[in-house]
Image: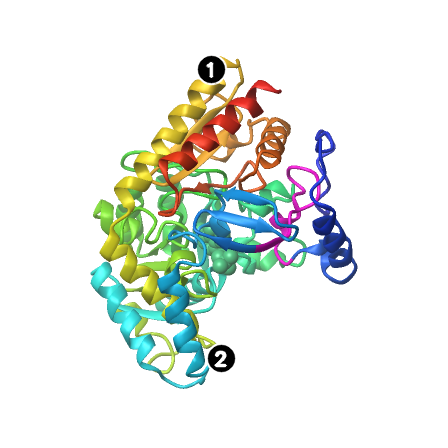
């Protein structure tokens, strides 16, 4: 299996990141593979060295040598309230002072399970885990244990974490790293996974007709965020719901990005489509390592200790992580920042599109709610084949043009960017002024 390579088409960035960042990266490369603990952080998709961050507050982050950036990455989605929200920090400090972990039951876990159920009525039972990957991996095992079947259907360009059978035609860092899959995944694990294009219901209908009886699960990002932002076409998710029911497969919505992103609930609940299981992460952990999976009680009750599907975790339901999630969800329900975030993101996308037109740049900004992606193509993007037509070198130049002006975006074309509740109209104006210059300079 080929290793991800630096994109040769990319010019070296005009100015390199701060010396302190570069020095830290050089140290990191000696002791951490690739210098990073998650591949896309390494800036390989855009060239140059990553910026090391020291702190954040609201919509801003500061690098290790004190340079301020306006942040549209938001830790890849969790920080919907912005960095270091005072109420979240205070709640976390209070809980941490009472003990970091017990490996025993706590009231916090019951509170968040009840809260999740009150946010999305179909989350009849949930189990807490420590990451999105773990949530998806566990939900799949459960679907297999429940149905007694082995095969899983996923969609090209959707990323569901790094468990073996899902590292097939995955998005996010696997796209930008130039690997369609991963070494170390056994042919057996890959063979259990069917992969079809996103947004293509006809292909699913055909597969279900042929092999529906083998399918344990159909798993989908209800709004794809890992090939850049790609919303579902009208009728697509309802069609998946119908087909999964028809063949007896468990329909899993991977809402690790979308959960609590479009409203204080799941995307499924918002659009009135009920999956059998839902995976959560990112926002529901309030910036701490936490995820969850849940849904139909009759399926969830197949988990140990009630049932025969084993799933466990020393730090599952960790009180400090749960507190961050509880407080974040509580604030989202109280403050309802969604309409304002959406308005800001729509202004950003419209402004970007106008600037691209003015400067004759082949690009457009996709946007849904507070998610957006500046795609370097003018063709609409409905699936991975469309996304791959983007000019990734042009994205890299845009990224560095923005970074030099103090704007921090996800460092790869095939990612969603995030407007948070901490962003203001002034921040959007700053983004657009910087984008105007970055697009003009090309
Ligand atoms: C849709 C989706 N599912 C699962 C995951 C994996 O989550 P984690 O990185 O917390 O393991 C991600 C991560 O970006 C994701 O976007």
Secondary structure of residue under mark 2: loop
> Residue 344 is drawn in which quadrant?
top left
Q: CA distance from mark 1 to mark 2?
A: 53 Å
Q: Position of residue 219 (x, y in %)?
A: 40, 52
- The answer to if 277 sits in the magenta stretch is no
Residue 162, label in figure? none
Foreground pick, 16 / 350: 16
Crowdedness near tag 1: few (<14), some (14–19) or many (≥20) residues, C-alpha within 10 Å: some
Name the one closer to the observer, 77 or 123: 77
Residue 268 screen position, x and y as percent: 27, 50
Q: Is residue 176 above or below residue 348?
A: below
Farthest front residue?
66
Q: Tell me which residue sits at (53%, 26%) in the image.
A: 376
Image mark for residue 314 = 2
Q: Residue at x 36, y 75 (%)?
A: 303
Nearest-to-viewer mark from 1 and 2: 1
Does 62 sit left or right of 150 as displayed? right
Q: Is residue 123 visible?
A: yes
The residue carrying pointer 2 sits among few (fewer than 14), some (14 to 19) or many (20 or more) residues within 10 Å by Cα, namely few
Residue at the disc numbered 1: 357
Asked if residue 366 lies left or right of residue 14, the reply is: left
Q: Which residues are magenta?
A: 37-54
Q: Determine if the C-beta at disc 1 is less than 8 A from ligand 1.
A: no
Q: Is 240 rendered above or below residue 279? A: above
Q: Nearer the viewer, residue 419 or 228?
A: 419
Asked where in the image residue 370 lies, by quadrant, the reply is top left
Q: Secondary structure at mark 1?
A: helix
Q: Is mark 2 within 8 Å of ligand 1?
A: no
- Tell me if residue 47 is in the magenta stretch: yes
Tell me the colour scheme of the image.
rainbow
How many badges with numbers are in the image?
Answer: 2
The majority secondary structure of the magenta stretch comes to loop
């Amino acid at each position: 299996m080929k290793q991800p390579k630096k994109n040769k088409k990319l010019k070296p960035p005009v100015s390199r990141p701060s010396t302190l960042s570069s020095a830290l990266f050089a140290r990191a490369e000696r002791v951490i593979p690739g210098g990073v603990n998650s591949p896309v952080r390494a800036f390989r998709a855009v060239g140059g060295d990553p910026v090391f961050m020291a702190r954040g507050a609201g919509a801003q982050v500061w690098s290790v040598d004190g340079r301020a950036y306006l942040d549209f990455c938001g830790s890849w989605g969790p920080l919907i309230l912005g960095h270091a929200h005072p109420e979240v920090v205070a709640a976390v400090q209070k809980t941490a002072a009472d003990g970091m972990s017990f490996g025993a039951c706590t009231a916090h876990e019951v509170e968040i399970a009840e809260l999740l159920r009150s946010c999305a009525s179909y989350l009849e039972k949930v189990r807490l885990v420590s990451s999105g990957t773990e949530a998806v991996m566990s939900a799949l095992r459960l679907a297999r244990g429940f149905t007694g079947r082995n095969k899983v259907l996923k969609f090209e360009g959707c990323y569901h974490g790094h468990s073996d059978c899902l590292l097939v035609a995955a998005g996010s860092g696997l796209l930008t790293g130039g690997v369609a899959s991963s070494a170390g995944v056994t042919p057996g694990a890959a063979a259990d996974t069917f992969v079809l294009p996103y947004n293509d219901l006809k292909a699913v209908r055909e597969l279900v007709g042929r092999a529906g009886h083998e399918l344990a699960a159909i798993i989908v990002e209800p709004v794809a965020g890992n090939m850049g932002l790609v919303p579902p076409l009208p009728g697509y998710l309802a069609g998946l719901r119908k087909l999964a029911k028809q063949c007896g497969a468990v329909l899993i919505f991977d809402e690790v990005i979308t959960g609590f992103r479009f409203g204080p609930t799941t995307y499924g609940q918002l659009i009135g489509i009920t999956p059998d299981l839902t995976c959560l992460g990112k926002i529901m952990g309030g910036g701490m390592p936490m995820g969850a999976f849940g849904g139909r009680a009759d399926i969830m009750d197949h988990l140990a200790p009630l049932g025969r599907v084993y799933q466990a975790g020393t730090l599952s339901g960790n009180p400090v992580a749960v507190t961050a999630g509880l407080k974040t969800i509580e604030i989202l329900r109280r403050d309802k920042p969604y309409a304002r975030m959406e308005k800001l993101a729509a202004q950003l996308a419209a402004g970007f599109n106008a600037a691209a037109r003015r400067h004759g740049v082949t690009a457009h900004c996709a946007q849904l709610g507070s998610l957006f992606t500046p795609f370097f193509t003018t063709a609409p993007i409905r699936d991975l084949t469309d996304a791959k037509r983007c000019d990734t070198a042009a994205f890299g130049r845009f990224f560095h043009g923005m970074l030099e002006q103090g704007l921090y975006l996800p460092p790869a074309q095939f990612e969603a960017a995030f407007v948070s509740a901490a962003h203001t109209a002034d921040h959007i104006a700053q983004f657009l002024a910087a984008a105007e210059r970055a697009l003009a300079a090309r």
